[in-house]
Every structure is written in structure tokens, then in C-alpha cells.
Image (cartoon, rainbow, N blue to C red):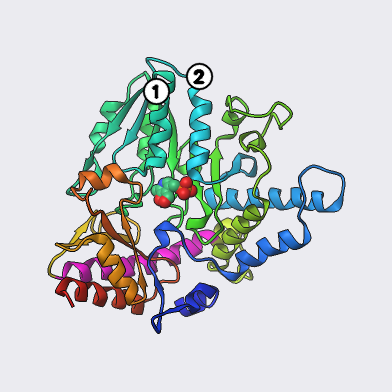
Amino acid sequence: MRVDQIRAHFPALERAHGGLPVAYFDGPGGTQVPRAVVVAMADYLYHHNANTHWAYPTSAETDAIIDAARAALADLLGAAPDEIAFGANMTTLTFHLARALGRGWGPGDEVVVTELDHHANVAPWRALAKERGITVRTVCLDPETGQLYWDQLARALSPRTRLVAIGAASNALGTVSDVRDAARAAREAGALTFVDAVHYAPHHLVDVRDLGCDFLACSAYKFYGPHIGVLYARRDLIDSLDVPKLEPAPEVGPERLETGTQNHEGMAGAAAAVDFLASLGGDGREPGTRRERLARAYEMMHQRQQALVERLWDGLGRIPGVRRFGPSPSAPRTATVSFVVEGVPSETVARSLAERAVFVSHGDFYATTCVGRLGQAEHGLVRAGCAIYTSDEEVSRLLAGVEEVARGA
Ligand SMILES: Cc1ncc(COP(=O)(O)O)c(C=O)c1O
């Protein structure tokens, strides 16, 4: 599918700012939403809105919509539908899971986290040090390469390790980490693996079985869906998790991980986002399952975004005064590039670009440790992320804008 055909699905792209069409490079903070997602959410709220498990049609329809949402997210993650739980967002789900796992841990137990990770995959585990007396070990970031010191992971593991918490892709630098290898090493040490796939899932097709992880979380609002979090938990672990829950709530299956009444319309929207992505891998007439269409769509997205990130990386590298961070496009990475313009605070760069209708994020993106290790704690980074709707023309406009800012124009 051509990029202009994809763009036609996104009403947000019709927006102009200062007479110019808006170029959204803020996808790592949240992507725009195609019409089909909003239609699915509105349809749920208008025509099927009810609470679950009751004996009348709208309640049964709600149950069916939730089941369909679990099936859709299972296809996206390579999991089974009864391994998919929903929640407010990845952060809340991770705190919830950490509290459940932590109830069985105490002094002498260890968790491994990384300096590259968003704090949502650090704070919930660190909280257990305070609450349960566990030890947290940290794998450090090499600021030069934007990658983790992989040998430190092996050294951090021991028979005391209960869990490795690792991000599949860095939202600050775009670095893709080898979580498959991390999960293998964790398994060999007798530990579980929790993967933060929030920044990974919009760019690479997750396969929880292939990764060999025990838990994985992502957020639909990063892959063209609504604001809702998704947690994969290995089926045989779900029922034994000591989750904080109300006594009358379901005892088995993913529902036991979900507290209170859920965001049903968000689930409907998340499922629609998966179907939208799958539709990019064929028009439905091609043979194959939704998972196979997703695989084709991600392959197409990957090819296109690899070309965009190469242009972006090289183009920024040619601008005097611009310093790029993270791995080059020849290393495994997403199409998210962070940089600074020497002598210009990141917020000023972002404001100047916004005047040119180029929307980029700035700051530490809650990857605070990582940005600090890069020596950019004071002003943070400027972050430009390519999404499925990003065009060549928008990359040109971004580069021209940065060039002007760097020149002081
Ligand atoms: C890599 C990464 N992990 C975790 C989070 C937190 O996700 P949520 O907003 O769903 O809690 C984000 C959000 O930006 C992220 O980029």
C-alpha cells in the first residue's frame, strides 16, 4: 500500500498549522489514529455498551467484543487469546504485575533492570526493593553505541535472580535489544523475563513464543489504537499469580489480572488497530490468517521505515551543530532518532520546528537514566519518530527545519 493510501485513513493528517500541513513525528509518544479505530469505539459505545457476563444482548455482545479483542491482540503478539489482559496503560499493568510477583519474593531475591529502559520498566521493580527487600541489579548503557553492555547481563544473573525486566526497544534512542537472548539467559538462570514492548510493537512484529518471554506489555496508543495497555502473561503462570483482586472477581484466566470494570471501548479500538495494521498486509482477499497479514504489513512497514530512518540519520549527520544519539541504521533499531542542536535547548528546537508544523517531542521521555547517561539531563533530547504515515516530504521538511534552527535562522 502506498503511503498516500495509508495517510488517507488518518483524519489528523488533514490538520494545518500556520498554513502548513502538520508532520507528526511524535509517534513514539503516541501515534495518530485511523478512522476505523474511532468507528469501532463509537460503535461499541453507541450500540453495545454494557457491563460483562449478564443475560441480555448488549452484555453478551460486550463479552464477545472483549473475546474478539483478546484474539486480535493475541494475533499481534503471537500469543493465545487467554494470555491477553488489558489495563489502563503499560505502567499500571507493570506495577500491578510487579506487586503480584513481589508478594512471593523477599530479601535474597533479585531482579535485573537496565539503564536503557523507560522508568515504567524500572520503578515497579525498584519499588519491590523498598517494599519486599529484594535486590535490584542494573545492566548499564554504553552511551557511545546506545546499546546495553550485554556481558553485564550474564554477570548480573545468578540462582538468586527471579526476573529480568528488559525493554525490546528504547523509546529514547530507538535501540533494539536482543530480548530473545536475554530471555534465554534468564531461563538458564531459572528466572522469568518481563519485556517492555511499548516502543517495539509499533515497529516490529512481536512473537512471544519466539522471544521466549514470560510476560510482555505494550500500549495500543503507540500502534494507532486508543489509550489502553496490553499485557501478555504465559498461560501457565496466570492462575498462580498472587494478584491483588476482589474476591468475587474471576479466579482464572486473564480476567483475574484485570481490576474493576475495563475500558471496553478501548479494547474494541485496540482490536480495530490490529485489524487496521493487518489490512496493510493485504486487502483480505489474499489467503492467510490475520497473523500472516500482520507479518506482511510489518515487513512492508519495516522496509519503508528503514529507508526513512537512513535518510533522517544521514541528513541530521550532515547538519553542522547537530549531534545524534543511539545506534546507526545499520544496527537493529526503530525509526526513532534523537538528537540535540549544540547550544540550543531541546524545547527551543521543538518549538521552532512546531512553528514550521513539524511536531517533535523533547525531554527525557521518562527514559531518565538513559538520557542522563548521555549527559543530556539538563535539556533532554529532541526526538523524531517515523510512523506508517510518515512521508519522504515530511522527512525533508524536518531536516530543513533543523538545518534552519542550527543556523540560527
Ligand atoms: C518504551 C516505553 N515503555 C513504557 C512506556 C509507558 O507506557 P504507558 O504510557 O502505556 O504506561 C512508554 C511510554 O512512552 C514507552 O515508550
Give the mark, 1 or 2, whose residue is nearer the N terminus: 2
**Dot 2: within a 10 Å radius of its alpha carbon, few (fewer than 14), some, or many (20 or more) residues?**
few
**Residue 347, can we see it?**
yes
Nearer the observer: mark 1 or 2; the answer is 1
**Dot 1: within a 10 Å radius of its alpha carbon, few (fewer than 14), some, or many (20 or more) residues?**
few
Ligand 1 within 8 Å of disc 1? The answer is no
**Residue 1, can we see it?**
no
The kind of residue tagged 2 is Gly
| Residue at figure coordinates x 75%, y 62% from the top left | 46
The kind of residue tagged 1 is Lys
Provide the secondary structure element on which disc 1 rests: helix
Name the residue that disc number 1 marks. 130
Name the residue that disc number 2 marks. 104
Image position of 374 (left or right of 128): left
The answer to whether 272 is drawn above or below residue 19 in the figure is above
Ligand 1 within 8 Å of disc 2? The answer is no
Image spot of residue 278 (x, y percent) = 56, 63
Q: Quadrant of residue 177?
A: top left
| Residue at figure coordinates x 27%, y 45% from the top left | 370
The answer to whether 108 is drawn above or below residue 21 in the figure is above
Please give the range of residues in magenta.
Answer: 294-319
Image position of 213 (left or right of 355): right
Task: Pick whichever, 44 or 303, lies toward us.
Answer: 44
Q: Main secondary structure of the magenta part?
A: helix
